[in-house]
Image (cartoon, rainbow, N blue to C red):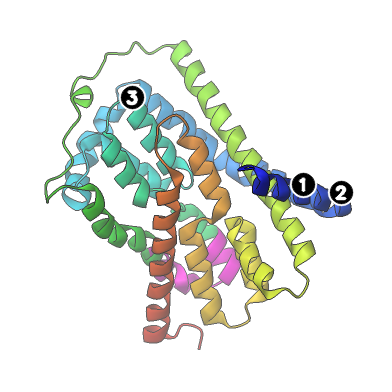
Amino acid sequence: MKHFPAGIFVTALFAAMLIFPQAVFSGAEEGLLLWFQIIFPTLFPFLVVTSLLLSSGGLNLITRLFGGLFRRIFRVTQNGAFAVLAGFLCGYPMGAKVTADLLRAEKISDREARYLLSFCNNTSPVFIINFIVWKTFGDESLMLPTLLILIGSPVLMSFIFRRIYLKGRHPFPEPSAALKEKKTRFDFSVLDSCMMNSFEAIVKVGGYIILFSVLLSLLEELSGQNSILIAAAPALEVTNGILLLSSSVSDPGLRYAAVLGLTSFGGLCSAAQTQCMLEGTGLSVIPYIIQKLTTAAAASLLSFIYLALFSPFH
């Protein structure tokens, strides 16, 4: 009986797919094109390179360059600094992927991994600039405030989240395994292993994008005039969700705050991708979702403050 609610949902989904096959096809097509044209070429190279960094000595160089600075700001270990860097620059779900890989390799502790997951799995600056600033709003003057809000929100929230995971004011201790780096002979077998690992990850990401695009397409078909379903639809997948908000919210200020809030959250699709990357680590996705929703609320609040102070849409 404990699986009964899930069974009802899947049965209803199957029925909806049979009733609205065109919506299923349209959603799957949009999701596949989004994955193939944007996500795959953007994310796959980073997946391969980060795997190579973890398998070779490249991680040491990055931690030496950024470890000290990030340790002072975020109280993380030197290896944890790499997860912060990847999570803020590479986009979903790279922060979660790198954090999980570091935890599996015993280069960070479980407590630090949960702290890193709370703030360093974010939308990439490239997506923010290209899709939100240029394509969605078409206003280059919004570039700086949008970047500051979407990057600053998780940074600000990290100061709150660290109180949950850090005991006292001391930074996370360096794990003993992180101090004893194993010498790895680099050859094409290492590259092959990293590529296969990256292919598995990117295919899983694509599967979730297609599935949630289908769900979004069906929800649009079923929502009609139901305001609750219409409001819930954008939260499924961030890219199509932003497009929905752009077409359904007429007030530019409210639209701006809603888009930045959704972008900060990442949508349920990115949460599913994150859980996929955390498989086998023992890390739970539930605290992650709660922390992302809190960060999204902070991003929306900062957006309203910016709009009240500078009124860019008047």
**Which residue was labeled with disc 1?**
11
Alpha carbons under labels 3 and 2: distance apart: 45 Å
Considering the numbered disc 2 on the image, is that residue within a helix, a strand or a loop? helix
Circle nearer the N terminus (1, 2): 1
Q: How many other residues sit within 10 Å of disc 1, few (<14), some (14-19) or many (≥20)?
A: few
* Amino acid type, callout 3: Ala
Expressed as whole percent of the image width and height from the top left, the position of residue 144 reads 39, 68
**Mark 1 and mark 2: Cα distance apart in space:** 11 Å
The image quarter in which residue 291 lies: bottom left
Q: Which residue is mark 3?
A: 105
Quarter in which the N terminus is drawn = top right
Say which residue label 2 marks. Answer: 18
The answer to whether any part of residue 37 appears in the image is no
Q: Is residue 72 visible?
A: yes
Residue in the picture at 39% in, 70% down:
145
Taking the spot 68% from the left edge, 73% from the top edge, the residue there is 247
112 lies left or right of 275: left
Q: Nearer the viewer, residue 293 or 122?
A: 293
Residue 127 is one of the magenta-drawn residues: no
Q: Which residues are magenta?
A: 131-147
